[in-house]
């Protein structure tokens, strides 16, 4: 029997504004698709998104 996957926390910081130039949220740097799908994503999918956020935050 497999152990259930540990929940992966949302990176939301309650600054919910989309940047028109980048198409990412100004707070968490996720796309609308990523934000909308977050609750349905597997833990692996969530970790994949989280891995991309530092590079997105580094871009102006």
Image (cartoon, helix red, strand yellow):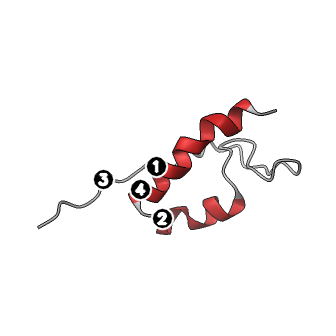
Task: Judge depth for marks 3 and 4 and give the one in front.
Answer: 4
Estimate the spatial distance between the alpha carbons at disc 1 and disc 4, rounded to whole Å: 5 Å
Give the image quarter of residue 14.
top right
The CA distance from mark 3 to mark 2 is 13 Å
Sequence-wise, which precedes: disc 1 or disc 2? Answer: 2
Q: Measure the C-alpha gap from mark 1 to mark 2.
A: 10 Å
Q: Quadrant location of the N terminus?
A: bottom left
Q: Looking at the rendered structure, which numbered label has been put on residue 6? A: 3
Disc 3 crowd rating (10 Å Cα; few below 14, some 14-19, many 20+) is few
Where does the image place residue 52, in percent across and percent down from the top left? 59, 43
Q: Are marks 3 and 2 in contact (CB under 8 Å)?
A: no
Residue at figure coordinates x 78%, y 49% from the top left = 17
Q: Quadrant of the C terminus?
A: top right
Crowd rating for badge 4 (residues with CA inside 10 Å; few <14, some 14–19, many 20+):
few
Element type at mark 2: loop
From what the image shows, is residue 8 above or below residue 33?
Answer: above
Of the image marks 3 and 4, the number of the one nearer the N terminus = 3
The disc placed on residue 41 is 2
| Label 1 environment density (alpha carbons within 10 Å; few <14, some 14–19, many ≥20) | some
Depth check: 12 or 23 in front?
23
Picture layout, residue 30 above or below residue 53: below
Q: Position of residue 45 (x, y in %)?
A: 47, 58
Nearest to N terminus: mark 1 or mark 3: 3
Q: CA distance from mark 1 to mark 3?
A: 11 Å
Residue 3, image x, y percentages: 18, 60
Q: State the residue in front, 44 or 40.
A: 44
The residue under label 4 is 44
Q: Which label was assigned to residue 47? A: 1
């Amino acid at each position: 029997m497999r152990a259930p996957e540990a929940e992966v926390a949302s990176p939301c910081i309650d600054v919910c504004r989309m940047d028109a130039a980048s198409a990412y949220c100004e707070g968490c740097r996720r796309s609308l698709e990523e934000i909308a799908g977050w609750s349905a994503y597997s833990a692996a999918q969530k970790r994949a998104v989280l891995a991309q956020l530092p590079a997105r935050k580094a871009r102006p």
